[in-house]
């Protein structure tokens, strides 16, 4: 756990940010000592999969009902695709540009990009970094198709043998086909078969999906250590108040039973459909023509 520094911060430095720090117990959100503020904006269960076993043993951690549900989703999508699922792994420098071309077709239709501006980056610099990672066998990227059309993707950098759950997304029109779950299951099975990696890291934040597929969890926090100044105090207190308001609103919506419906509407309902234009014929034909079966 990052402690308050015993020496002054370097000149020109406001402080430090530590991500995914393991903690034994939850920390105070805001504390101060010797002119330093410690702000803890996020404390969460960090989920991950231990890949140092077999896929058969991994499956045994699921209940019979959960295994049946996942198997049914995969089989249902295979039936939708005519009996077999078309998906692809991208891991070489020469494959990265094609992956991102297809990923952008999906990403621009997702709620992450439309509502949160958090889609897969659309820049030459990001593609170049991915190509550099691929040259050192430090990336895996995956695409799920319906025929020749991309419907779900995952982009996973690799650090010290750990596969990182990076950018992901799926076409909202395929929500009822559970394409995100289908792709994740296929990827996990392949990672176990590769036998090259130690862990699959779901990164910070919590979700039912992460908890369902993880083999382990640990309590972690993101921690800021910054100089105590009027500006930094104002920024942190403002962020803390906004966070409290957000939690209060979420709890209120939970009490009246509206939170889940609103989230669904934002992700897959009227707002998402209004924001996402219909897939054009030219986009569809381009994807079909340029994808190598």
Image: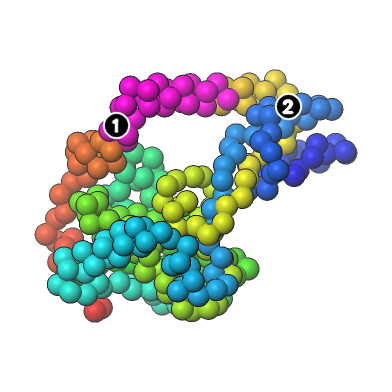
Q: Which residue lies at the image location 55% right of the left edge and 77% below the top edge?
A: 196
Q: Which residue lies at the image location 48% right of the left edge and 79% below the top edge?
A: 194
Prevailing secondary structure class for the magenta stretch in the rendered image: helix
- Give the percent coordinates (x, y) of residue 221: 63, 42
Q: Please tell me whether mark 1 sits on a helix, a strand or a loop.
A: helix
When the figure is inspected, residue 13 is found, relative to residue 140, above or below; the finding is above
Quadrant where the image shows the N terminus: top right
When the figure is inspected, residue 130 is found, relative to residue 33, above or below; the finding is below
In this view, the residue in front, 181 or 225, is 181
- The earlier-in-sequence mark between 1 and 2 is 2
Mark 1 vs 2: CB contact within 8 A = no
Q: How crowded is mark 2: few (under 14 residues within 10 Å), some or many (20 or more)?
A: few
Q: Determine which residue is flagged by label 2.
A: 31
Q: Examine the image and state in which quarter residue 96 appears.
A: bottom left
- Give the percent coordinates (x, y) of residue 288: 18, 70
In this view, the residue in front, 186 or 12, is 186
Q: Determine which residue is flagged by label 1.
A: 262
Magenta-tinted stretch: 240-263
In the picture, measured across the screen, residue 154 lies left or right of residue 205, that is left
Q: Which residue lies at the image location 36% right of the left edge and 69% below the top edge?
A: 186
Quadrant where the image shows the C terminus: bottom left
Residue 80 in sight from this viewpoint: yes
Q: Which residue lies at the image location 65% right of the left edge and 29% below the top edge?
A: 29
Alpha carbon separation for disc pair 1 and 2: 35 Å
In the picture, measured across the screen, residue 25 lies left or right of residue 150, that is right
Q: Examine the image and state in which quarter residue 258 appears.
A: top left
Q: Please tell me whether mark 2 sits on a helix, a strand or a loop.
A: strand
- Residue 82 magenta: no
Residue 105 in sight from this viewpoint: no
In this view, the residue in front, 138 or 194, is 194
- Give the percent coordinates (x, y) of residue 27: 69, 34
């Amino acid at each position: 756990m990052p402690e308050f520094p015993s020496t002054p911060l370097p000149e020109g430095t406001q402080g430090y940010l530590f991500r995914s720090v393991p903690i034994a117990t939850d920390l105070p959100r805001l504390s101060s000592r010797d002119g330093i503020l410690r702000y803890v904006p996020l404390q969460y269960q960090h989920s991950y999969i231990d890949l140092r076993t077999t896929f058969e043993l991994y499956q045994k951690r699921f209940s019979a009902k959960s295994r049946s549900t996942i198997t049914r989703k995969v089989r249902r999508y295979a039936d939708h695709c005519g009996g077999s699922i078309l998906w692809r792994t991208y891991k070489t420098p020469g494959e990265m540009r094609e992956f991102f071309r297809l990923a952008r077709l999906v990403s621009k239709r997702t709620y992450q990009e439309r509502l949160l501006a958090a889609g897969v980056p659309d820049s030459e610099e990001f593609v170049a970094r991915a190509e550099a990672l691929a040259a050192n066998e430090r990336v895996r990227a995956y695409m799920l198709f319906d025929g020749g059309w991309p419907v779900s993707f995952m982009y996973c950098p690799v650090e010290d043998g750990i596969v990182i759950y990076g950018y992901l997304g799926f076409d909202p029109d395929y929500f009822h086909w559970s394409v995100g779950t289908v792709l994740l299951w296929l990827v996990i099975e392949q990672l176990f078969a590769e036998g090259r990696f130690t862990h699959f890291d779901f990164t910070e934040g919590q979700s039912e999906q992460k908890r369902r597929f993880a083999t382990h969890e640990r309590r972690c926090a993101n921690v800021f250590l910054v100089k105590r100044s009027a500006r930094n105090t104002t920024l942190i207190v403002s962020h803390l108040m906004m966070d409290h308001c957000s939690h209060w609103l979420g709890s209120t919506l939970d009490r009246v039973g509206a939170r889940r419906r609103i989230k669904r509407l934002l992700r897959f309902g009227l707002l998402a459909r209004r924001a996402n234009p219909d897939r054009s014929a030219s986009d569809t034909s381009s994807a079909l023509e340029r994808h190598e079966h």
